[in-house]
Image (cartoon, rainbow, N blue to C red):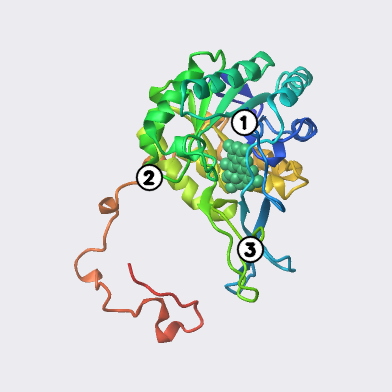
């Protein structure tokens, strides 16, 4: 049987389950049309809002790189490094809704079979702010948006009623989702922040508000590192820095941990997996845990701004993996490893004499293994 990469997710058909996440790769009409030409099954636009947006002076995103065979981590450009993460303090789109509206319509008319999801954001502190969500939702769906993704997760917001400050409050998540659902004729996805104790609580709020899917994760709150030479943060404006978001390879294990909690708590719900995906092997983690689509940001930013080679590898990797396992569609392997994540006490222990606790080794720093990397083995 021929391998079929297409998926149906929240009632929408995607040619393949790979989307560009809401971020610089989807900040303009030309980027989005290039992305569709390159083969992405869908895009989530850069978040659109109604409030004025002015970004910081200087770069909004930089990349932290590791020097192999050493412990050096730095944003400084130098040869022979490996990508560790992206760090950004970029706000939502600084283009107005009026700027976006005609472009959304043109994109959708030019690519009717590709999925255009619009990411939207407003506040939650008053009825008029909730109306802003509805204004944004109506304007986008009237131009042909196939779905709406609610940005409840931007990590760098001073306003207490916006971004991840909504995402940290399950009641607000519910209220905002419900307000959008009241006017939406298209599926509504809620994008949650990883920066809470138990993401299942906020996801429940989203589903109670009527969300058709949950997207997870946005970036993790973090700071750039301090340069040991200059004693300045590697990214700063006038010496000052503020909390920003970590993305890319460093967050893959953390993001799949969040996703595992979500898909176990809601095995019958739809999830779009995000965080650290650069190749199909990474995306496969999300699919095996139960996701129906995945989204990519950092890896695409570093590949001609919209990821033509990344999507080529994702599609080829999925086809090759499906052929190797004899799977004919994503449904045949979605969630296959969801139940392998269990509470700690369910992990088998060695029995009887086989277990010598900490008595037969001095951790990783034993004298006989002096060529191995050393580590402290507490906790
Ligand atoms: C520079 C930059 C800007 C971003 N802007 C948005 C945004 O406007 N809306 C949003 O929901 N997420 C935004 N994100 C988060 C990404 O969509 C994504 O959730 C995150 O980067 C994790 O994916 P990754 O590991 O593939 O980068 C942004 C990320 C970066 C790096």
Name the element at disc 2: helix
Vertical relation: 103 (above or below) 22:
above
In terms of depth relative to the viewer, which is nearer, 201 or 273?
201
| Numbered tag placed on residue 51 in the rendering | 1
In terms of depth relative to the viewer, which is nearer, 288 or 269?
269
Q: Residue at x 39, y 35 (%)?
A: 169
Mark 1 vs mark 3, CA separation in Å: 27 Å
Q: Which quadrant would residue 368 be assigned to in this image?
A: bottom left
332 vs 82, left or right, is left
Image quadrant, ligand 1 = top right
Name the element at disc 1: loop
Where is residue 17 shown, x and y percent of the image?
61, 32
Q: Are marks 1 and 3 in contact (CB under 8 Å)?
A: no
Q: Which of the marked residues, 2 or 3, is nearer the chain's N terminus?
A: 3
Q: Residues within 10 Å of mark 3 (few under 14, many from 20)?
A: few
Closest to the camera, between mark 2 and mark 3, is: 3
359 vs 91, left or right, is left
Name the element at disc 3: loop
Closest to the camera, between mark 1 and mark 2, is: 1
Q: Which of the marked residues, 1 or 3, is nearer the chain's N terminus?
A: 1
Q: Residue at x 52, y 37 (%)?
A: 163
Vertical relation: 230 (above or below) 218:
below
| Numbered tag placed on residue 239 in the rendering | 3
Q: Residue furthest bottom?
A: 367
288 vs 346, left or right, is right
Q: Which residue is mark 2?
A: 340
């Amino acid at each position: 049987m021929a391998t079929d990469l297409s998926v149906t997710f929240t009632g929408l058909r995607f040619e393949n389950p790979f989307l560009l996440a809401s971020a610089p790769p989807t900040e303009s009409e030309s980027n989005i049309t290039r992305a569709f030409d390159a083969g992405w099954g869908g895009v989530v636009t850069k978040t659109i809002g109604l409030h004025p947006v002015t970004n910081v002076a200087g770069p909004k995103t930089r990349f932290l790189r590791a020097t192999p065979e050493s412990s050096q981590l730095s944003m400084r450009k130098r040869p022979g490094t490996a990508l560790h993460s992206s760090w950004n303090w970029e706000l939502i789109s600084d283009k107005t809704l009026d700027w976006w509206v005609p472009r959304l319509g043109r994109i959708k008319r030019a690519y009717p079979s590709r999925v255009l999801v619009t990411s939207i954001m407003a506040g939650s502190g008053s009825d008029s702010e909730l109306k802003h969500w509805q204004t944004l939702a109506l304007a986008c769906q009237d131009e042909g948006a196939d779905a709406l993704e609610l940005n409840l997760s931007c990590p760098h917001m001073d306003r207490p009623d916006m971004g991840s400050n909504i995402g940290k409050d399950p009641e607000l998540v519910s209220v905002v989702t419900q307000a959008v659902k009241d006017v939406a004729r298209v599926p509504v996805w809620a994008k949650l922040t990883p920066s809470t104790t138990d993401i299942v609580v906020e996801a429940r709020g989203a589903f109670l508000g009527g969300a058709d899917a949950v997207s997870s994760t946005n970036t993790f709150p973090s700071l750039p590192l301090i340069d040991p030479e200059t004693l300045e943060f590697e990214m700063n404006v006038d010496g000052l820095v503020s909390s920003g978001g970590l993305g890319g390879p460093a967050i893959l294990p953390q993001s799949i941990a969040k996703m595992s909690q979500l898909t176990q708590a809601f095995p019958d719900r739809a999830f779009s997996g995000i965080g650290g995906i650069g190749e199909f092997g990474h995306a496969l983690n999300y699919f095996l845990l139960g996701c129906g689509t995945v989204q990519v940001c950092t890896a695409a930013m570093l590949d001609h701004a919209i990821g033509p080679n990344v999507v080529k590898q994702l599609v080829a990797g999925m086809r090759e993996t499906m052929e190797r396992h004899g799977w004919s569609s994503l449904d045949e392997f979605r969630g296959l490893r969801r139940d392998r994540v269990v509470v700690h006490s369910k992990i088998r222990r060695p029995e009887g004499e086989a277990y010598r606790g900490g008595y037969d080794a001095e951790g990783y720093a034993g004298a006989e293994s002096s060529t191995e990397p050393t580590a402290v083995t507490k906790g």
